[in-house]
Amino acid sequence: MARLFTAVVQLFLLTTAVAQATYVRQGSSHRSRSQTKIAWRACDVEGAAVPVECGSLSVPLDYTAEDSNATLNLELFKVPAVNSPSKGSILFNFGGPGDTGIADLALFGDVLRVLTGGYHDLVVFVPRGTDNNTLPFSCYSTAVERTIAQLSLAAGNSSDVAAGRNWANAQILADTCYVAQNETGAFVGTSFVARDMMRIVDALGEDGLLRYWGFSYGTLLGATAAAMFPDRMDKVILDGVVNPHEYYQNREVEMFTDTDKVFAGFCSGCVADPARCPLARNHTAASLEEAILSFMYHLKYNPIAVHIPDLGGTLVEYTLLRQLTLNNLYAPSIWPAFATFLDGLMSGDMGPVIAYITSLLSQPSPVAAEALQGIKCGDVLVRSPTLEDILPVVEGRHRASKVAGDAADHVPMWCAQWQIDAKERYRGDFRVRTRNPVLVIGNTYDPVTPLAAARNVSAGLEGSVVLQHDGYGHSSLAQASLCTAMAIRAYFVNGTLPEPGTVCDVHVPLFAGTDGFDEILKHFENGGNATAKRDSTDRSGLARRLLAPKPFFMGI
């Protein structure tokens, strides 16, 4: 029974427990609270495609406490440059908040090294609150407590009582996290993480400027850093852009602007490639879209019982399918597998359904405990005392997307009632002139960070340029484009921005089952610059890991 209970919550939320611990130590004085240099050493990182080095850096626990000498250690991981002369380090954040980024850099390090030209060290640091070692943010002392809390989540349109239920559960979470985290929970906000990045830049001992590539929530972090430290920005890429205005106001409606367009692409790609999409049958794109939406509605009243060998049974119901659908819109490379699962579910063939669910249960969550809530909700500037106050946001999300607008209603409800404010919350605007212009990348069809958000952010960053990546999925890593790859390389190597209005084509078929980066590697190998190959099977698994929805959007 315990094993089944755990399996159910893994399927529903894909989360893992992180034990509560404190990693705060005392430094010698306020002005010497951080190291001046990072000592790198070789280390083993599971699944790494290229050699990785590890290091650590002591930084202030509380940047607002001038007289405090408390510090914490940040863990850092580096993929060294292979070309010379060195052009410095590039810091990365792959999203979240709540993802450490370690596995992302290790698994995708070969591609990122090629895309950036090979002249830079590629560096990931584990942000505050995201793991056991760097000020973990955990609200529960046992996995059972966490499981009970998480099983209560429901999609907003799953029933006429779902909104009230989600609101009440959000209050329980806020109360629980306040009790568990009221001493250190205020130290994990994005502004402090931005300051940590600048401490890392100083400790690297290069030119004192930030080179950075952020994805998803990482664009929010990057935009915040640019607004706080505009004179210290070198080459900065924001890729898969979060609207920072809506983020800090807990009013995220724009994020679902293009979700239904991505879903329409899933359906049209399916019927255009029936050999890879059994769901196609005799459908047109429009009829398939309607059939899937009707089936979701059917599940409200007719959930499907699925027996999983060695684990017992579970239910596939409306909420789960809505969340899985949004999950899979992140990466076209995993669309064939999801289509096979969905076809089995709709036709009553449980074989593919069981295989798919079993595969999901084998995947670890990229996110630590309640890191999402601790970071994101601590950042939010506006609280809402009643359900009625937050309903306009929730209803706006529902109107924005018929396929997934209600999949994560609990996220704004969590933040509306949150009781721990980050020690420093960014309150300024995002209209700044950075030392060097920022490159902003937005996909034409992104399920959670629409092109409109990229243009919104670029409008405030003087001199920045928007590169439109004409593909599907979340960020430019979802589908490869040689045009985008060359633009990124030119920017990091030479500081050259693409012309305003540039649109980069994507040549990977939607149901190819790969992201197409093998072809990008081959292209640069022909020029003598690539360093590794990886087969398409491995690449598909990578997309599932790297582009899995960070809980910033999904809460799963």
Image (cartoon, rainbow, N blue to C red):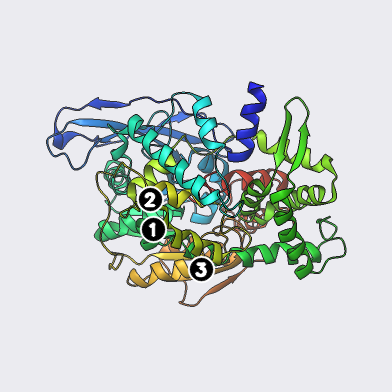
Q: Which residue is mark 2?
A: 416
Q: Earlier in the sequence, mark 1 or mark 2?
A: 1
- Please give the residue where the numbered disc 3 appears in the rendered image: 451
Q: Which residue is mark 1?
A: 389
Q: Which kind of residue does numbered mark 1 sit on?
A: Asp
Whole-angstrom CA distance, mark 1 to mark 2, is 9 Å
Question: Badge 2: how crowded within 10 Å, few (<14), some, or many (20+)?
Answer: many
Give the quarter of the figure containing the C terminus: top right
Asked whether 351 or 420 is in front, the reply is 420
Left or right of 92 in this view: 399: right
Give the farthest residue toward the left.
Answer: 67
Residue type, mark 3 in image: Leu
Q: What is the x, y in percent for residue 248?
A: 35, 56
Q: Quadrant of residue 439?
A: bottom left
Judge whether 144 appears above or below 344 on screen.
Answer: above
Could you tell me which residue is drawn at 26 percent across and 58 percent down? 427
